[in-house]
Image (cartoon, rainbow, N blue to C red):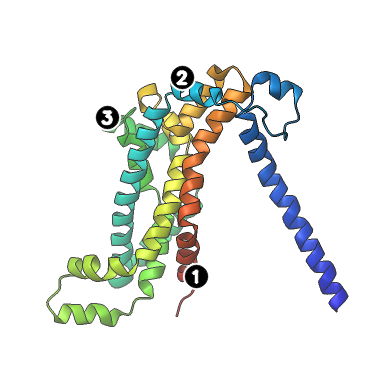
Amino acid sequence: MRKTNKIFDIFNHTLFVIFSLIVIMPLAITFFSSFKTPIQIASESVLSFPSPFTLENYIDVFKDGNVLTAVKNSTILVVAAVVINSLLASMVAYSLSRFEFKLKRFFFFLLSVGMLLPGFIAEITRFGIIAKLGVYDTLLAPLLIYVGTDLMQIYIYKQFIDQIPFSIDESAMMDGCSYFTIYWKIIFPMIVPATATLAILKTVAVLNDMFTPYLYMPSPKNATLTTMLMNYVGRSGSWAKLSAAVVVVMIPGIVIYLIFRKKILAGMAAGAVKE
């Protein structure tokens, strides 16, 4: 038995090392290449440390890549999407968890179907709606999509709210609190772990999304970090500059995850246990 367990442990550790290398190697190659000149990339190993290293690639990215505009637009989309989505999703989840109404089961069915169907199925209809609203090629176009299509967030919020005893609501109502007061002053503060987790995940999703901004905001003035990178590919002229642009785009998501990774795991664990 011990021999079998030892073999199993060795197998698990080997798989872990292999998959870690698969993830880390491309990142390391890109990071090292961003500090090299084109001559160094052509003559040295892809994994060799840049010596001497240069910051010229990053200077060119910030000078020619429209980075500051992309950072501004991405920040606006992230902040607005997180705030509005958290409020709307938690309100809907509170209503579904606490109130009984006609067609509630049918609504849940539609919610489940909406989470299972791929988003591109409704892309033509969605594009037509955005165009008729007159918000095409503005920041409002992707914002409406980010706010209106995150059905999973409603479901996760509901799982959290279901764990809060209904007796708390009853006590508040006896003290004269309205439904909105109960939601805002009692329920919402109690689901802060879920809000923090979902906000971080939403932030990473918006930062990494390239399809929606590219389709609905083609103008350079509305570029986000991902569309800036895509447009820079054709203008960079070298792998070194493109690597620097990739690193610039990766930094916000990595920093957010490193800072808030404990909250992400805590929120997921809290939502996975139902008493």
Q: Amino acid at mark 2?
A: Asp
In-image side of 274 versus 168 (left or right): right
Local crowd size for mark 3, using a 10 Å CA cut-off: few (<14), some (14–19), many (≥20): few
Disc 3 from disc 1: Cα separation: 41 Å
Q: Nearer the viewer, residue 161 or 221?
A: 221
Q: Is residue 138 above or below residue 195?
A: above
In the structure shown, which secondary structural element does the residue marked by tag 2 occupy? Answer: helix
Q: Which residue is mark 3?
A: 134
Quarter holding residue 12: bottom right
The residue that appears at 35% across and 33% down in the rendered structure is 72
In-image side of 181 versus 205 (left or right): left
The answer to the question of whether label 3 and label 1 lie on touching residues, with beta carbons closer than 8 A, is no
Task: Work out whether mark 2 precedes mark 1 in sequence or the reverse, and give the earlier one.
Answer: 2
The residue that appears at 63% across and 40% down in the rendered structure is 27
Task: Work out whether mark 3 precedes mark 1 in sequence or the reverse, and give the earlier one.
Answer: 3
The residue that appears at 59% across and 29% down in the rendered structure is 243
Q: Which residue is mark 1?
A: 272
Mark whose residue sits in front, 2 or 1: 2
Disc 2 from disc 1: Cα separation: 46 Å
Task: Work out whether mark 2 precedes mark 3 in sequence or the reverse, and give the earlier one.
Answer: 2
Q: Which residue is mark 2?
A: 64
Q: Amino acid at mark 3?
A: Gly
The x, y position of residue 51, in whole percent, is 67, 29
Q: Amino acid at mark 1?
A: Ala
Disc 2 from disc 3: Cα separation: 31 Å
